[in-house]
Image (cartoon, rainbow, N blue to C red):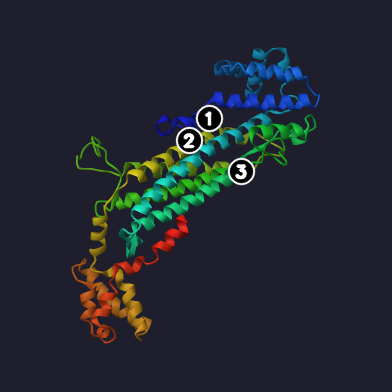
Amino acid sequence: MIPRYSRPDMVKIWEPENRFRIWFEIEAHATDALAKRGVVPEAAAQALWKWWDTNPTIDVAAIDAIEAVTKHDVIAFLTWVAEQVGDEARFMHQGMTSSDVLDTCLAVQLTQATDLLLADMDALLAAIKTRAMEHKFTPTIGRSHGIHAEPVTFGMKLAQAYAEFARGRERLVAARAEIATCAISGAVGTFANIDPEVEAHVAAKLGLAVEPVSTQVIPRDRHAMYFATLGVIASSIERLATEVRHLQRTEVLEAEEYFSPGQKGSSAMPHKRNPVLTENLTGLARMVRGYVTPALENVALWHERDISHSSVERYIGPDATITLDFALGRLTGVIDKLMIYPERMQKNLDRMGGLVHSQRVLLALTQAGISREDSYRIVQRNAMKVWESDGAESLMELLKADVDVTAKMTASEIEDRFNLDYHFKHIDTIFDRVFG
C-alpha cells in the first residue's frame, strides 16, 4: 500500500521485522513444548529465549540475502537464527513444515490488524453517535430515487449509519475469531512428526484457537470470510460517504466536508469546495472490495496444499487492512468535522410547496370515505400542479380550493395534515432501538 493511504500502526504489523518476530515466537514456543515432552533438550529452548531476551535486532537484509540463495523464506530465516543462536538452534522446527509457521503467523498478523480495525470502528461509532444526538430532531427531507419523499431528521440518517457500522463491528469480531487459528501439524497435517500438544501449546501462547484439521495449511474459507467482512465494511463506508457527497451538491448543500483555512478546491476555479475526502473514500472502498474475490478464489487449493494462495495473500493481507484502517480513520474525521446546515435543510423541505405531506392527505381522504383510487387521483392532480410550478403553487391552498377535498375535509383538517412534527413522533423509539 502506498504511504498516502497508510497509517503507521497498521503498517508496522505488516513490516518484515514484525513478521520475523512472530516466526521466532512460533518456533521458540514449539521448541519449548517439544522440550517438555523430551523430544529436544531443554537447553535448546533455553538458548533460543536467552538470545531473544537480549532484544536482538532482526536483520531483514541478512535474511533476504540468504533467501536470495535458498529461494525459501522460512529456511532463510531459520538459517539466520541459527547463525545468531549457535548449535542449539538445530532443534528448531522439529517435525514442522513451513506452512505451520506461515499460516500461524498470518493468523497473528490478521488478529493484530483486526484489533486496530475494531478500535477504528469504535472511534467512528462514537463520532456518528455524537452527531446523531446533536441533530436528533433536525428536520430534513428524506429522498427516494433522489427525489423528495417525506420528512425525516438528520439525526435519523446518522442513526441508520450507526446501526449499520455496529453490525459491521459485530461481523468483524466474528471474523477475528474465524481467522485466529493455529496450525502446527507438520507435512500434510497428520502430526506424524510432532504431537498435537505442541500445537495446543503454541496456540495458547499466541492467543489463538487450535485449527481442527489443517491439511498442512489452514483452510482458506476462513480467510475468505475475513476479507468478505472487510469488503462489507468498506461498502458501508462508501454508503455514508456517498450520502455526504450528495448532500454537499450545490443544489442541495445540507451538509459538507470541513473546508480548512488555506484549502484549495480547484486549480482553475477559486470558488470550489469539493467533497474530496468522501470521493476518496468511495475509491478506497472499491479497492477493499477488490480484494474479496481473490480471497474467495484462494479457497480451492490442490489436495492438501499448494501455494497459489501465497502471492495473493502477500498483497491482500497488508493492502486490505491498511486501506480499511485509513478509510475508517478518514471517515471518522469527516463525520466529526461535518458542517451541517439546518436552515438549508428547512429551505429544501419547503421548496416544493408542501408536496412532502401528500400521503397524509391521501390517507385522510380514504378515512373520510373516498376510495383509495379516487383519493390518489384527487391528491395527485393537485400535486402535479405544484410540481409543474416548481413549488410556486401551494399544495395546501390547492387542496382547500378543490371541492372534492373540501366535501370531506375542513380547512383546519387539511392544515393539520401539513404538520411537520407529525413525522417525528417515533424518533425517540428509533433512537432507543439503535443506541439503547
Q: Residue at x 74, y 27 (%)?
A: 33
Q: Residue at horizontal 34%, vertical 56%?
A: 154
Q: In the rendered structure, are the residues bearing label 2 and label 1 in contact, judged by CB atoms less than 8 Å apart?
A: yes
Please provide percent x and percent y for residue 281. Answer: 39, 43
| Residue denoted by label 3 | 177
Distance (Cα) linking label 3 and label 2:
20 Å
Q: Secondary structure at mark 1?
A: helix
Q: Secondary structure at mark 3?
A: helix
* Whole-percent x, y for residue 257 in the image: 30, 45
On residue 322, the disc is 2
Quarter of the image for residue 392 reads: bottom left
How dense is the environment of label 1, judged by Cα within 10 Å: few (below 14), some, or many (20 and up)?
many
Vertically, is 170 above or below 313? below
Task: Give whichever of 238, 424 is nearer the camera.
Answer: 424
Q: Does residue 42 lie above or below 364 as drawn?
A: above
Residue type, numbered disc 2 = Ile
